[in-house]
Image (cartoon, rainbow, N blue to C red):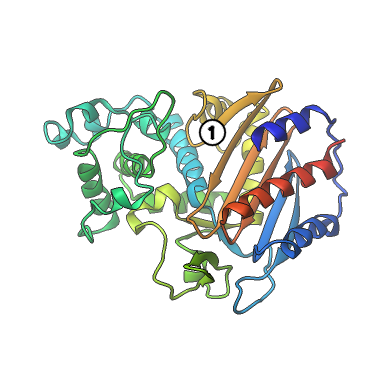
Amino acid sequence: MKKSLILLLCSFTFLVNGQKSHPEFDSLANDLISRTTIPSVVFSYITPDTCLYGIAGINNINDKQKVKLEDKYSLGSNTKAITALIAMKMIEEGQIKLDTRLIDLMPSLEGGINQYYEDITFGSLLSHRAWVRPYMYEVDHNTLPKTFPGKLTNQRNLFTKHVLNQDSVFSLTYSYSNAGYVIASHMMEIAAKTSYEKLIATFMNEMNYDHYFGLANREDENAPSGHMMEGEVWTEIGPTHEYSGLPTYMGAAGMLSMNILDYAHLIQMQLNGLKNQNTYISAKSMNTHHYGLDNYAYGWINGEMGGMKYSTHDGSLGINYCHAIILPQIPCAIVIMLNSSLPEHHQSMAELEQNILMKMLR
């Protein structure tokens, strides 16, 4: 998908058209809904000074209420990019460094964890190069106790000790890990002397963004529900469904929900940062955030095709999908949110992205 996207971009010239009407994007969204089983889609085409939106579909297959731009959708693993963005701010403020070792902040771990992990750093955790286990599948989650006692900060402390007594997982590039981001978030709260959740809340308040930790329909029962196959039945993951995503203490890995309006402006801010503007963080820090390391920097996958740089990330809890891509040399970005995540829906999302670009680039 990324290859075809970049090749398409290389074939067209960007048109800045701030007057592009919402109905045209809504038409693309309605077309997607009409030919798939995706319950709803919201998306935004983003330039340095404009966010244009498309929307169609229903909040869930039972209530069938029309979705609104103000509705929150799960970001899934795109939460990681927000965690890393706040980390970059903390680095600028001198609270922590990329090369700060975990053991420097938690000296009690020395001698009590897998010896290899004693040298892992904040940067290696944010870039998935600490080689901790992924905690994306049942094989890892089944090693956890049913609950960790205490407040969320203490739960992350115990989770960190548990994970760092397990075997490492090495890769020649990076080894994607939910656990790594939970540990990184614990380093952040130790360095900042406040909880990770308060760090997120402070950021969201400063940026005037609405957010929720957890599935959005647990905050508002009318918010879009995720959907998945249970056996052969297409099922709404409603407000009272037993599935609730990751454990609460793992929020940094993938449990934020936001609406498309705020999330698009968050991505727009980063697009402008990559165009050498100082925003929430400096332009230099933004470049490190997205491109500081090849393949996966600090919260963003990156690459270059046809001479064009891109950074991208996808998030899913198996019941939803959030896709973001930033192309600073165009300059533009696209965000797409679905409340389903079947493999064929991923393909339909990629086709939608192509259609959006075809309308905006020629």
> Where does residue 295 sit, x and y in percent of width and height?
52, 27
User: In the image, residue 98 lies at what x, y percent?
Assistant: 38, 27
Q: Nearer the viewer, residue 343 or 359?
A: 343
Q: Which one is in front, 152 or 202?
A: 152
Going by the numbered disc 1, the residue's amino acid type is Ile
Q: Residue furthest bottom?
A: 63
94 vs 143, left or right, is right
Residue 168 visible in the picture: yes
Height in image: 24 above or below 174?
below
Q: Position of residue 224 (x, y in %)?
A: 58, 68
Residue at x-position 49% and y-position 29%: 297
Give the labeled residue for mark 1.
Answer: 301
Residue reaching furthest to the top: 307
Q: Is residue 237 above or below residue 73?
A: below
Q: Residue at x 50, y 73 (%)?
A: 238
Q: Quadrant of the C terminus?
A: top right
* Residue 277 seen from this side: no
The percent position of residue 177, horizontal first and vertical second, equals 38, 40
Q: Say which quadrant the N terminus sits in.
A: top right
Location of residue 104 with respect to 26 vertically, above or below: above
Rendering quarter of residue 123 = top left
Tag 1's secondary structure?
strand
